[in-house]
Amino acid sequence: MRSFCFKRLQILSSSFKTHITANNIVENEAQNSLLGTDFYRTMKVDNHIHLAAASSAKTFVDFVRNKLKNEGDVVVLENGLTLNEVFCNAGLDTDHLTIDAFNVLADYSVYQRFDNFNGKYSPFRSAQLRKIFLKVDNHLHGRYFAELTKIVLARHEASKGHVSATEMRLSIYGMERTEWQRLACWILHDWPGDYPGKVLSTHNRWLVQVPRLWRIFCSKGEGTRSFQDMLENLFSPLFEATLYPDDNPEIAEVLKHIVGFDSVDDEGSAESPCSCSRPSTWREESNPAYAWQLYYLWAN
C-alpha cells in the first residue's frame, strides 16, 4: 500500500508541475482579479488535529515548566504524589525541560511504527506525565489539559497574520457509558487560568475519534461482554441526550459543537476477514474486521 501511494503521489506531483508550467500566466491573472480577499484572509480549517497534539512543542514545554515552577506542590495523582515528586521520581528536573528532551516532535519514525506514533503523545515517554497533562480523566479532572487547550484556542481566535480554524479531536473509547458525561462536563466547566471559561471557541468544532479497542474492552469483561455492549456505551448516551435533552443537558449542549466521528487504529496491522456476525454475538477476543466495525459506527 505504501509503495502504491508513493507512486501515486509522484504521478500527481508531476501532473501538477506540468499544469503550473503550462498555465502559470492564466493562474496568476485569475488570482490577481480576485477582489476583497487573498490567501491570508481566507479561512483555513485544519481538520485532523488530535487535541493532545494541538499545542506546539514549545508551548507545551513552557506550560509544563510554568506548572512545575508555580504548582510544584499540587497533588496530581490519586496516590497523593505532587507534581514535584512525580518529576523527582522520574529523575527529571527543570534542566530536562527542553523540546528535545520532551521528545514530542514528529519525525520519520512515526510513519513506520504505530507505537512510535503513540509514544510522541507522552513527554519523556512517561504515561504518568501524559495522564497529568494530556488527559481529561485524572486527579485534577483535566484542569491542566483544559488550560493548555485554552491557550491554543486563544491563539486561533487572535488570528495574528492569518485566519484559521480547527476541528480538533477528542477520544471516546466505549469502555464505560459515563465517558460522554465526563467529557461534556470537562468541555463545559468554567475553568480558571489566563483564559478562563469553557473549552469552546468560535474557531473550533470538535470531532470525536473512536479507537478500535475491542480487545481491551473484551478482556476487562472476561468473556461476558459483546460488541453490542461497546456500541451501547458509545451511542446510547447520545440518543438519550437527543431524545431527552432536559435530562442530559451537558451532553445535549456539547453535541451542538461536534461535527463528526472517526475511527482510528493501526491501519498497518493485519486483520481477520469481515464477519457476518451480529454485534450481540461477537465475543471473540480478536478485533473484528475494520469494515465490520466501521459499518456499525456509520449505522449509528
Image (spheres, helix red, strand yellow):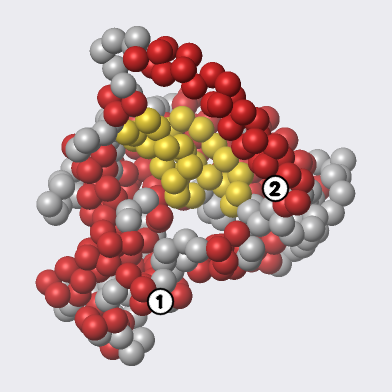
Q: Can see residue 116?
A: yes
Check disc 1 and give the amino acid type.
Phe
Q: Is residue 36 above or below residue 174?
A: above
Crowdedness near tag 2: few (<14), some (14–19) or many (≥20) residues, C-alpha within 10 Å:
few
Residue 134: give x, y in percent of width and height: 37, 61
Q: Of the numbered discs in the image, which one, if any, rests on residue 50?
A: none
* SS of the residue under disc 2: helix
Q: Are marks 2 and 1 in contact (CB under 8 Å)?
A: no
Left/right placement of residue 223 relative to residue 140 reads: right
Three-letter amino acid code of the residue under disc 2:
Phe
Q: Nearer the viewer, residue 249 or 69?
A: 69
Which of marks 1 and 2 precedes in the sequence? 2
Measured as percent of width and height from the top left, residue 105 is found at 42, 64
Spot occupied by residue 206 in the image (x, y as percentages of width and height):
41, 37
Q: Position of residue 176 (x, y in %)?
A: 53, 53
Instruction: Determine the residue positioned at 70% across, 37% down.
Output: 11
Q: CA distance from mark 2 to mark 1?
A: 32 Å
Q: Which residue is mark 1?
A: 124
- Crowding at dot 1, Cα within 10 Å, few <14 / some 14-19 / many 20+, comes out as many
Residue lying at 38% horizontally and 60% vertically, measured from the top left: 135
Q: Which residue has dot 2 on it? A: 6
Q: The C terminus appears in which quarter of the rendering?
A: top right
Q: Nearer the viewer, mark 2 or mark 1?
A: 2
